[in-house]
């Protein structure tokens, strides 16, 4: 059973001259020579470090050596593929067909005739002289009303004729009333099968638009979203157009770390994937061709990363996908440890499912070799989040058991030189491309290994993960409920650092293992301090509510007694 309601908005009859939206000034020019040079130097640094690690003369004790080689091999392979993709990012998906379609998207004479000069949200869009219809789906699942209100208002006001739908899997009467108040259509389904993908598939059974756009409830779209994306569909093989996730709430350590963690991906990696027709959907800020999704039987529902799986299925059916590095919607990054954990666990689970359950290199697959490699990188990416677990354990092996990853004859200077050739150049590249190096990102990348280990284990054993919305704050709790492994590791590393400093003081010599372990302790310590601050923020309102409730309880008791 479905609840579907719509309250029409009063049309505006004021006749004014239509002002067509200006073209975006977003740059898609080729990569600068200095960036290309820096990427090539970083690649040389990566290869030099790999050669050093794999040189038998450098090999130390087997256990720590294998741990370092395993962890660093994952990081090196991901880094090399990233360099390859970044160097491919000069490809501009805006071809002649796009520009021609963009120039004829609206008909000013018809706009004047219909009296919609001052109402761009009613302007009919045309592709190849054919009017097209667009449904805008806003998926909700327990987000607060003010957040939903901002998104719905902005979606309704977008330039180009479209219908705005609120797809409420939270089954909230308040959301239903809000949609009616704002003039959006409302859909509520009685089951939650397929999570977000199931929600969208259900809406597709009720709508008829040629294209449909998906927005998470906290992503507020720019008025030109449709203007900048619909013209790509002049190419009948384009299945979807994806735009970046950009965040406007980078107000604390977690939101900044989570937000900046995605920046390189959206600014350099996704654009590079265009060259290989391997850009994938990220679940929001995206517009689909209905016929393409119908060709694969709807959005994929058997994974918590339905967006990547849907992209994979479309590519296997030889559809084309487009990514444009133009911010057309701004949302909220996870700003609590619990929200960040939910988000990363969901994404990592989907990635590992692709890696372990999908036969990327099957002869039956119609993916190109480039596409297979790009999806292999996507599926294995979250292994880089498990690598820190191995690297955190290497210094304690030397401190407690005198086991070293490199040969005793290898000097500290040699080790640092090759190590810096890999990591320092990555930091320099981050400075160049992003304007700075974010310690918050380093902290989260180091402290997230329990999340990715859990995701890998869940996929290996087939454990089902319950879907939860990242932005749902109805049951916000202490961050320490979800970071027990990190706290235990921090305690272990802190004690190990104390032992190491005592040992080095006694020997009158600072060792690399001590410096390495102390650094790891400080990084995890920063994460624990962040959790303490968040815990204090969460606990304060709870204590306030408890204190304010006590007098009321006393008054009630007195009244009953009298």
Image: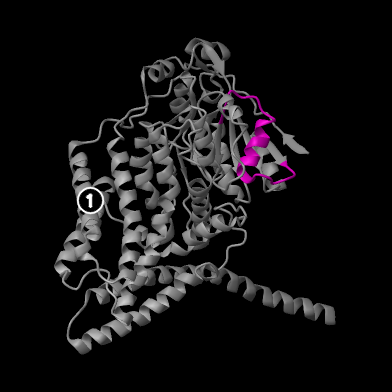
Is residue 374 shown above or below 551? above
Residue at 61% across, 52% down: 467
Residue at 38% across, 66% down: 390
Residue at 37% across, 44% down: 265
Q: In terms of image quadrants, where is residue 445? A: bottom left
- Residue 58 or residue 448, whichever sits in front: 58
The residue furthest bottom is 506
- Residue 401 or residue 537, whichever sits in front: 401
Residue underneath mark 1:
47
Q: What is the quadrant of the C terminus in the image?
A: bottom right
Q: What is the quadrant of the N terminus in the image?
A: top right
Q: In terms of image quadrants, where is residue 244? A: top left
Is residue 431 shown above or below 484? above
Residue at 37% across, 24% down: 94
SS for dot 1: helix
Q: Can residue 562 be seen in this view?
A: no
The chosen color scheme is one colour
Q: In terms of image quadrants, where is residue 530? A: bottom left
Q: How crowded is mark 1: few (under 14 residues within 10 Å), some or many (20 or more)?
A: some
Residue 430 at x, y percent in the picture: 27, 50
79 sits to left or right of 349: left
- Residue 282 or residue 294, whichever sits in front: 294
Say whether residue 403 is magenta.
Answer: no
- Residue 401 or residue 140, whichever sits in front: 401
Say whether residue 196 is magenta.
Answer: yes
316 sits to left or right of 253: right
Residue 24 at x, y percent in the picture: 36, 28
The range drawn in magenta is 189-212
Residue 204 at x, y percent in the picture: 65, 31
């Amino acid at each position: 059973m479905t609840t579907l309601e719509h309250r029409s908005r009063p049309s505006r009859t004021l006749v004014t001259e239509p002002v067509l939206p200006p073209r975006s000034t977003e740059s898609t020019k080729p990569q600068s020579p200095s960036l290309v040079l820096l990427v090539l130097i970083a690649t040389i640094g990566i290869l030099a470090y790999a050669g050093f690690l794999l040189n038998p003369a450098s090999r130390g004790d087997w256990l720590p050596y294998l741990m370092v080689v395993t962890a660093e091999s994952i990081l090196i392979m991901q880094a090399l593929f990233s360099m390859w993709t970044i160097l491919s990012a000069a490809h501009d998906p805006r071809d002649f067909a796009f520009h021609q379609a963009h120039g004829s998207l609206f008909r000013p004479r018809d706009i004047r005739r219909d009296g919609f000069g001052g109402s761009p949200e009613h302007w009919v869009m045309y592709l190849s002289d054919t009017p097209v219809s667009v449904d805008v789906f806003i998926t909700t699942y327990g987000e607060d009303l003010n957040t939903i209100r901002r998104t719905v208002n902005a979606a309704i006001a977008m330039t180009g004729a479209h219908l705005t739908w609120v797809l409420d899997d939270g089954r909230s009467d308040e959301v239903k009333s809000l949609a009616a108040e704002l003039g959006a259509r409302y859909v509520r389904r009685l089951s939650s099968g397929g999570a977000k993908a199931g929600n969208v598939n259900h809406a597709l059974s009720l709508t008829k638009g040629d294209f449909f756009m998906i927005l998470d409830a906290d992503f507020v779209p720019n008025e030109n979203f449709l203007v900048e994306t619909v013209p790509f569909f002049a190419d009948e093989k384009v299945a979807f157009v994806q735009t970046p996730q950009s965040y406007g709430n980078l107000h604390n350590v977690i939101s900044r770390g989570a937000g900046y963690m995605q920046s390189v991906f959206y600014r350099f990696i996704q654009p590079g994937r265009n060259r290989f027709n391997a850009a994938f959907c990220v679940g929001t800020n995206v517009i689909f061709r209905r016929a393409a999704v119908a060709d694969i039987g709807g959005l994929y529902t058997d994974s918590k990363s339905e967006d990547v799986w849907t992209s994979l299925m479309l590519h296997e059916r030889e559809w084309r996908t487009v990514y444009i590095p133009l911010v057309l919607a701004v949302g909220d990054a996870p700003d609590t440890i619990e929200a960040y954990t939910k988000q990363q666990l969901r994404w990592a689970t989907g990635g590992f499912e692709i890696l372990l359950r999908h036969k990327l290199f099957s002869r039956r697959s119609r993916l190109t070799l480039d596409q297979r490699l790009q999806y292999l990188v996507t599926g294995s990416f979250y292994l880089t989040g498990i690598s820190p677990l191995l690297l955190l354990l290497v210094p304690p092996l030397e401190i407690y058991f005198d086991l070293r990853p490199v040969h005793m004859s290898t000097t500290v200077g040699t080790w640092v030189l090759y190590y810096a050739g890999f990591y320092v150049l990555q930091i320099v590249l981050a400075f160049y491309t992003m304007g700075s190096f974010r310690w918050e990102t380093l902290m989260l990348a180091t402290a997230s290994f329990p999340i990715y280990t859990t995701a890998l284990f869940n996929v290996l054993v087939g454990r089902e993960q319950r879907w939860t919305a990242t932005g749902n704050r109805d049951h916000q709790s202490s961050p320490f409920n979800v970071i027990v492994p990190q706290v235990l590791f921090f305690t272990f590393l802190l004690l190990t650092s104390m032992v190491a400093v005592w040992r080095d003081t006694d020997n009158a010599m600072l060792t690399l293992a001590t410096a390495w372990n102390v650094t790891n302790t400080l990084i995890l310590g920063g994460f624990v301090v962040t959790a303490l601050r968040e815990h204090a923020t969460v606990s304060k309102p709870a204590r306030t509510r408890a204190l304010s409730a006590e007098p009321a309880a006393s008054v009630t008791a007195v009244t009953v007694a009298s």
